[in-house]
Amino acid sequence: MDPLILASECDPAKEIICAPTNVIELFQFDEALFSIGPMDFTRTVILTFLAMFIVIGLLYFAFRTPRVVPTKFGAAMESLVLFVRDDVAKGTIGPDGIKYAPYLLSMFLFILVANLFEVTPFINFPLTSRMAIPLFLAVLTWVIFVFVGFKKNGISYLTGIIWPKSVPVALRWLVGLIEFFSTFLLRPITLAVRLFANLVAGHLMLTLLLGSGWIFMSAIGDIGIRSIIGLPWFVFGLGIFVFELVVAVLQAYIFTLLSAVYIQTSVHPEH
Amino acid sequence: MFELFYALEEAAEESSGIDLLLPETSELIAGILAFSIIFLVVWKFALPKLSQILEARQQAITGQLTEAESAKKEAESLLDDYKEQVAGARKEANQIVDDARQSGEALRTDIVAKADAEAAEIAEKARKEASAERERAASRIRDEVAALSLDVAQKVVAGTVDEGAQRDLVARYIDDLGGMG
Amino acid sequence: MEEIKGAIALIGYGLAAIGPGIGIGIVVGNAIQAMARQPEAAGLARTTMFLGIAFTEALALIGFVLFFIA
């Protein structure tokens, strides 16, 4: 799909890399395949539901039948789930972090699958390079940590942020201002944008490099020796492919970990 | 790579970049729906099921351990039993061998004594027989000698007259002796 | 060069990325030192490292957003 957009605007005989005049096209699939009421079932929407079914399927097949000795797949899923539950939720938030484990785990798995769509053949499109999922999850985390902060500490949660006791009086207003903006405005924005930006950049690089390599090398009949330009793009693209595999997992982990850390700062604000 | 930057820059000029930062309504709805369903599955199914699996595994392992412990104890008591039995059997066997040896010894001394006695008896009998035989032989010889002496004396008395007759007599006696011999 | 092409937002994003780049380097470097000195506290150091990166990276991400908005 993406190479088609690239190829329609690329002249391998003149350019040295294929890039569309508007990269936004690489991320937009506006034409709805079908619509139900206000819902347009674009490619992204369908992929979102596909990701949902994959996550549910993974969980279902891993934990369907209890086994004393788990299968390899079951053991892998178990260690993944236990990692999020014990290391991220309990390890970061504390013993009562087990309450947030379902939220963190479903977030982690959803983002992980959505990210890995970037490097899945025939899909090649990270859902998290659209703003909807990162923004929704970041806002949800924001709602949770603000709610928990007020529930656990009352109004002192807010006053503790804008009038920090641990700072010299002369600086309190400045630190308080920075902390206020950082906590209530920058946290959700950066949480969403970090994930989004990483995946946008990754998808852009993969598409341009692999797409260019493919277009140049497949145009060998028309442009002759000039198609050798495609080879370094392709090799570079393969390197980025492996790198993006790491980024996809790491970003899902970081998003989950930071959500846990933000919740933890609301549960125990003095730390 | 400059082409890439041109592309980015043109995108910025068209000011459609902001579109990328704002979520599409239908995608947002889809994301919320999908996440809610995943959350429900994780909350109601996956995590309780996992705890249940871990619990069951722990119980199974502890159960197996205690079972193994009891089996080991049973085996140990069985082994002790066997050892005791073996020790008893060995003792009994030793007893039997000792008894057999003692009775054998007794039998042997008995047999030897009996044989000694028998041999002594036989020897005694033989000796008695031999002495009786000798006695008998001696008495017969004595009888023989007496008769002979009587005979000789008669012959001496009868033949005194004649020297030649005497010599004849002696020769005849010697002949008689030789004929007897 | 008789003509300079390009959007000023690109330069803005480039400038916005300098500080966080250096900052993340310092954060990660010190976190690695901490982990090497006290491997038993590696988990804590790692969490704190990611938190520090998150705060530092925020500036670059704001630059990224402003690039798209501009």
Image (tube, rainbow, N blue to C red):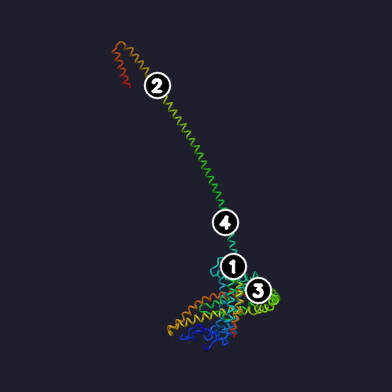
Of pointers 4 and 2, the one earlier in the residue sequence = 4
In 3D space, how far apart are the residues under numbered discs 1 and 2 (Cα atoms)?
Answer: 132 Å
Q: In this view, does A62 lie above or below C60?
A: above
Cβ–Cβ below 8 Å for labels 3 and 1?
A: no
Q: What element carries label 4?
A: helix
CA neighbours of label 3 inside 10 A, class few (<14), some (14 to 19), many (20+):
some
Q: In this view, does C54 lie above or below C5?
A: above
Disc 1 target residue: C37
Residue B138's tag is 2
Q: Which amino acid does label 1 sit on?
A: Arg
In which chain is the residue bearing label 3?
A
Q: Which amino acid does label 2 sit on?
A: Ala
Residue A139's tag is none
Foreground mark, 1 or 2, reads 1
Disc 4 target residue: B72
Q: Which amino acid does label 4 sit on?
A: Lys
Residue A265's tag is 3
Foreground mark, 4 or 2, reads 4
The residue lying furthest to the front in this view is: C1
Q: Is mark 3 on a helix, strand or loop?
A: helix
Q: Which amino acid does label 3 sit on?
A: Thr
Identified at 47% across, 79% down, the residue is: A232
Q: Nearer the viewer, residue A2 or B61?
A: A2
3 and 1 marks on the same chain: no
In which chain is the residue bearing label 2?
B
